[in-house]
Amino acid sequence: MRTRIKEIFRCQSKFKDQEVTIMGWVRTNRAQAQFGFLNVNDGSFLNNLQVVYENDLVNFDEISKFGVGVSVNIRGKVVLTPEMKQPLELHASKVEMLGDCPETYPIQPKRHTREFLREVAHLRPRTNLFSAVFRIRSVAAMAIHTYFQDRGYLYVHTPLITCADCEGSDQMFKITTLDLNNLPLNAGKVDYSKDLFGKQAFITGSGQLQGETFAMAFGDIYTFGPTFRTENSNTKVHANEFWMIEPEMAFCDLNGLMDIEEEMLKFVIQYVIERCPEEIAFCDQFVAKGLKAKIERLLSSNFTRITHKEVIDILQKANIKWEFEPTYNGDIAKEHEKYITEYFNGPVFITNWPKDIKAYYMKLNSDNETVAAVDLIVPEAGELMGGSQREENLEKLLTRMKELKVDANNIDWYLDTRRYGGCVHSGFGMGFERLIMYLTGIENIRDVIPFPRTPKNCEF
Amino acid sequence: MRTRIKEIFRCQSKFKDQEVTIMGWVRTNRAQAQFGFLNVNDGSFLNNLQVVYENDLVNFDEISKFGVGVSVNIRGKVVLTPEMKQPLELHASKVEMLGDCPETYPIQPKRHTREFLREVAHLRPRTNLFSAVFRIRSVAAMAIHTYFQDRGYLYVHTPLITCADCEGSDQMFKITTLDLNNLPLNAGKVDYSKDLFGKQAFITGSGQLQGETFAMAFGDIYTFGPTFRTENSNTKVHANEFWMIEPEMAFCDLNGLMDIEEEMLKFVIQYVIERCPEEIAFCDQFVAKGLKAKIERLLSSNFTRITHKEVIDILQKANIKWEFEPTYNGDIAKEHEKYITEYFNGPVFITNWPKDIKAYYMKLNSDNETVAAVDLIVPEAGELMGGSQREENLEKLLTRMKELKVDANNIDWYLDTRRYGGCVHSGFGMGFERLIMYLTGIENIRDVIPFPRTPKNCEF
């Protein structure tokens, strides 16, 4: 029977002076003449277990030479060491090598650059940094499922393959089973009737439209799945494949939407703080000083609710030379977001955006100029979620689609949500990676995705 | 403040004689001269709430004419009716229409064929059947996350976009940002250096290889995400997009793997039975008689463990004229699966398969003829999971890759799991839809996926 290292750390009194068997990987080995120390990690826990081995072990000389990365099977007694730096150690009665690891092993116990570690993305989870980051990612994913499921939301798997190119197919990857070196043609054009689906298909950038159809049946639903963008931009915040959460709630207006966004974010942060204290402390110490205080502050923050117009008023009154001049019909730049979160000293919901810079499905306000959209901007993170009340009025929706040149024929099924028992409803989208960057302090999206996909980069 | 109908049903004594506001959709309306009944569903619960409205309401005549599908806002008093068929009803003091629904509404209160409902996949969740099926799907997804997270597994998002065509690129969709009507060429072939990733890319059919690299860091991991196959087959059990769970465990052999598969399956079934009693009862009554007894029986079943060779022995001894003759180096057909689960009267793990019909990464047994693979076959469902102990020996793995013509250069990173601290490890894959078909009794995969993708079919 194998014991996980996390369990030993979490239940120290239970394991005090007990014999246990652990299996894991050697992180360091300090051998002396009479005894030595192995730091062993089994992946269950951020911290290593210190194993003491003495020269009465039959294979003491062999153990002394175990290199970094070797996998081991160790039996020993748990000894609590409250006077030491680490709270406990394992006094080994048996240390067996399971798999060797040559000295060419790239992950040595020293500081590696993040750039280097991206080149060995399949090995970087064996470092403390990525052990922390990907554990926080996993726990945060569970936090999201828990939040929504506990509140009766339906988790819906919206399709990734789609033929409805309503959001602009230039933003979507084309998919095909045709041989690109030998495409079937019809009148000089690719004959998609020969393709698997009988027409041109894409992988999608959003499950919102399908999500809305489910909200009109189940009331409250959420999606949580991968999403794709073809953007050819090499920045720290863009990836071509990322995960997104898209909740959609019937009978919910813009204020209700903001309530949910705020409650969900606080729930997820609390959940991660409780379950990943070592990981948060590690990121606080080695990634972004002050991280822990930052996210704890958010938990007790009041989220300001303010209109886009009021934001522009504040920005224009500020005695600052902006790189981008704030305007009533324009977007809000990074520099503005920063100023506004500092101005209110906390997260800010910005509502009622000019209709011309937002999507067709957002509810037109009575001023005919703004839509009931909301962006949540958060200190040091910028925009974390974007959502809106949806236009539930079919005629108004069709008018907006015409204005924005969205082909209604393509998504006639979507319009049924307004034809048959429509109601006030709202939804938002949250990029999961952006949340993880916020929770870890990591600044490059490539370092919060196990195997990131960015332009010219699709390894592993 | 709006109350969900599920809450009223679940906490009847709390709501007894209380005033509540509900919002939902009219499923039926039976109007008489003095009073009428609305059956209202808000999506939180399979069952409808019966609303009684009397002619003292100012808009009684209007309410009497509310059609099926209308969305409503209703205030009223909860009255327990233990003597009636339904345990409670709502005596309305206010009934307001939120959104009308014309008589052309396709979802009328009558039996629709599943084939018809597939054509209105965006509306079918408004039927009892799909309300039950997709709620079971959502709850089962949470059951899987709960099982693994409670046991310390890391949830890893393996990439969907991949350039490693190791599993046979003919099975994968090609993706591209190139204009297919104007492809860049180099020496007469498509010049993928002009594509977004600088080379040919696909969407993947498995996250196993990347999952293994994470298991060698975190010990226990699982994936849960969408998967794609290009198979051009129109059967009841094939779809081109489906969801899959792929756990991978370090320091775990074939027996440990079977322990986990059995425990997980029982956990998920128990979880769904507890949380979806109405949905399971509905499926039992209207989809597959005996469903409830079937899945409850599985909970108390002993899962038999038997080798492929032993299975063939039994099949050959059986006094049956097989359509497919069972052989020691061949696969096990549906008819054989059925016989074997009946023979053992329960689920059966079939282990140690002939190496020639299994994948290169499976551990070669000492007989040099079989691999440590295991398929779990379940009464009435057939194969529910497939897994194996992985070949941890690099030389043996390379030999198998050469024999099966798998290009090792393409996945050299994967081989690092064997080079650097390798260990005995195992994993399995479970098709999520197959589980949902088992849990609901639904026989066509198109009816357990919100918006199914099959050849020539990519609507919505």
Image (cartoon, coloured by chain):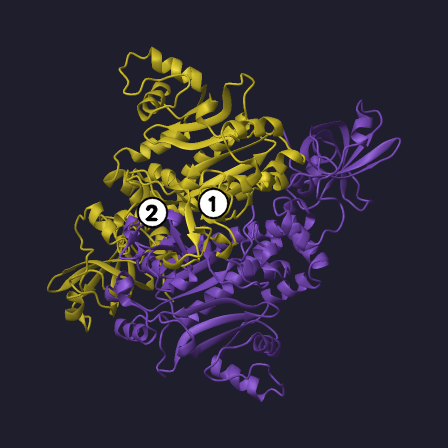
Chain colours: A yellow, B purple
Tell which of A3 and B340 is nearer to you: B340
Q: Residues within 10 Å of mark 1 (few under 14, many from 20)?
A: many
Q: Residues within 10 Å of mark 2 (few under 14, many from 20)?
A: many
In space, the residues marked 2 and 1 are separated at their CA atoms by 15 Å
Question: Quick check: can you spot residue A58?
Answer: yes
Q: Is residue A159 above or below residue A238?
A: below
Q: Please state which amino acid type lies under the numbered disc 2.
A: Ile
Q: Secondary structure at mark 2?
A: loop
Residue B390 is drawn in which quadrant? bottom left
Tell which of B349 and A60 is nearer to you: B349
Residue B177 at what x, y percent from top left? 37, 47
Residue A449's disc is 2
Residue B156 at what x, y percent from top left? 38, 52
Mark 2 or 1 closer to N-term? 1
Residue B17's disc is none
Q: In the current view of this chain or complex, which residue is farthest to the front?
A: A187
Q: Which residue is mark 1?
A: A224
